[in-house]
Amino acid sequence: MINQQKAKEAYDLFVQKAKDDDRILGVVLSGGRGKGAQTENSDYDVMLITTDDGFEGVKADYQKTEFVDSLPHSISEFREYAKTGSRSQYDKYTFAHNQAIVDKTGEIQKLVNEKGLIEPDQINRIVRDALGGYLNSLYRALKNLRDGDILAGHLDADETIPRILTFIFAIEGRVRPFNKFLEWELNNHPLSKLPIETKDFLQKIEKIISLADLEVQKEVLEMVKKMAVDSGYSDKIAEWEGYYFG
């Protein structure tokens, strides 16, 4: 367990140092603390946004400590960081519901806000890819379970979960949370288009992962189909008419 008082003191000193450093344009508190979802074991994960010329110096001067884990980005690199289609797109959720605690130019918070959501011109593609991937994995799961191939059926059922999650968040322009924050996200920032209670939805996810439960998979399929149709993706559902879904 981390000594939280010492950690807070170290963090406050770190931030003050960054505020006084002309090479640093912004400070973003990430991880669980950035979202207000920290635990007793949380340290302080900090992104330092630097001038282009100051990056190397800041990287050398702000090393990871026992309580503060710092990651520098030059402003030019940060503008491109976590964009959909980039190698760092996996990190988009880091910026959801997050604040720049230091923003010397006014640009840093704007970039944080943009990175924490799916870019508008990418929503349709992501929704369609996730929906198609989900239906494909579900089709394989149900066929394998029907044919007695339990291992393959369970593996395919597990693969439906990230695609379901990507889909239900993407239709609202939101990024799928890291698994650690899924329950927190749904409780604190509910999905307006999810037609069932968070508790019920998470229970269904758990049953699919642990049991590959056929009836639950069919219930979730009907839920996803309704959400897709209501959101204007009935054509994607129609592509799978006639395929075996139990």
Image (spheres, rainbow, N blue to C red):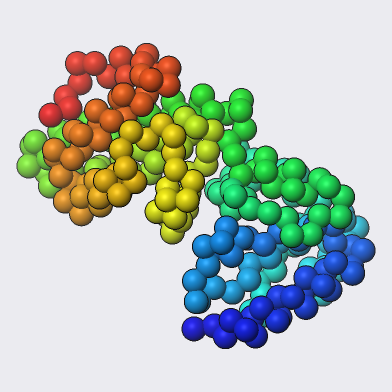
- 63 relative to 94 in the view: left or right: right
Which residue is nearer to you in this view: 163 or 4? Answer: 4
- 148 relative to 177 in the view: left or right: left
The image position of residue 34, as x and y in percent, is: 61, 60
Residue lying at 32% horizontally and 42% vertically, measured from the top left: 197
- 173 relative to 73 in the view: left or right: left
Residue lying at 39% horizontally and 41% vertically, measured from the top left: 165
Q: Look at the picture and state if 20 lies above or below 130.
A: below
**Occupied quadrant, residue 225:** top left
**Occupied quadrant, residue 190:** top left
Instruction: Tell me, yes or no, if residue 61 can be seen here.
Output: yes
Number of numbered callouts drawn: 0
**Occupied quadrant, residue 86:** top right
Q: Look at the picture and state if 207 lies above or below 31.
A: above
The image position of residue 164, as x and y in percent, is: 36, 38
The image position of residue 159, as x and y in percent, is: 31, 43
Which residue is nearer to you in this view: 135 or 182? Answer: 182
The image position of residue 125, as x and y in percent, is: 51, 26
Instruction: Tell me, yes or no, if residue 155 can be seen here.
Output: no
- 236 relative to 93 in the view: left or right: left
Quadrant occupied by the C terminus = top left
Q: Look at the picture and state if 134 lies above or below 30.
A: above
Q: Look at the picture and state if 13 lies above or below 241.
A: below
Residue lying at 79% horizontally and 59% vertically, measured from the top left: 102
Residue lying at 34% horizontally and 46% vertically, measured from the top left: 198
